[in-house]
Image: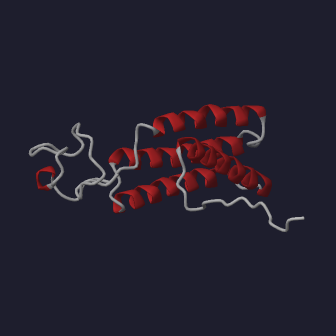
Amino acid sequence: MSSKKNTVRVDWKAPHGILTGTLNATAGTLVTTALAHSAGMPSGYALAAGAAGAVGSSVAGWRNRLTGATVAFRAACWTAAGTWSCWALSAGGPVTLTGLGSLLVGGMPLGRWRRGSRRTRRPNRPADACSCPSAPAGRSPRSGSSGSPGCAGWRT
């Protein structure tokens, strides 16, 4: 008999991908709204929480120098989550066929839109100061060049 256990190790520092991020956000919205419904919370609180999340994620995104598309996407996700939660709380609860269906229809396209807003940092210096060959002088890093990961002026 062997006393060695088969254990599964989970990398908790791994970032979310397109699918897992969308599923995590959708499930989090559903669970939070279900708890709010169970506690009898007014629907306006969900809308206020979504607005506060949108403002907070926008400020954090700009402070971390994320692209405008990424900041706008995150703010839109918070706004959508708050709006859906407000609607679900006022329409009889989130765990109804209509509530779950609308969450599915509203949440799944977010993963597709996420592909277009990559989590890329804005460059810290102009393209002509960049030493990589993929950023010719006079062009900004976001104007069509690929942005090699080894360039100090690009952060991917």
Using the image as rendered, state which of residue 61 and residue 145 is in the foreground.
Answer: 145
**What residue is at 72 percent from the left and 58 percent from the top?**
8
Residue 101 occupies which quadrant of the picture? top right
Residue 58 picture location, percent across and down = 41, 55
Q: Please state if 56 lies on the left or on the right of 149 as rendered.
A: right
Q: Residue at the location (47% across, 44% down)?
A: 76
130 w.r.t. 111: above or below: below
In the picture as drawn, the residue positioned furthest to the right comes out as 1
Residue 149 appears at what percent x and percent y? 31, 51
Q: How is colour applied across the structure in the image?
A: secondary structure
How many labels were placed on the picture?
0
Q: Nearer the viewer, residue 129 or 116?
A: 129
**Front-most of residues 110 and 92:** 110
Image location (x, y in percent) of residue 113:
47, 35
Residue 50 shown left or right of residue 38 in the figure: left
- Left or right position of 117 against 94: left
Report x, y in % for residue 73: 44, 44
In the rendered view, does 131 fall on the left or right side of 54?
left
Residue under the point 73% across and 42% down:
94
- Residue ranking furthest to the bottom: 3
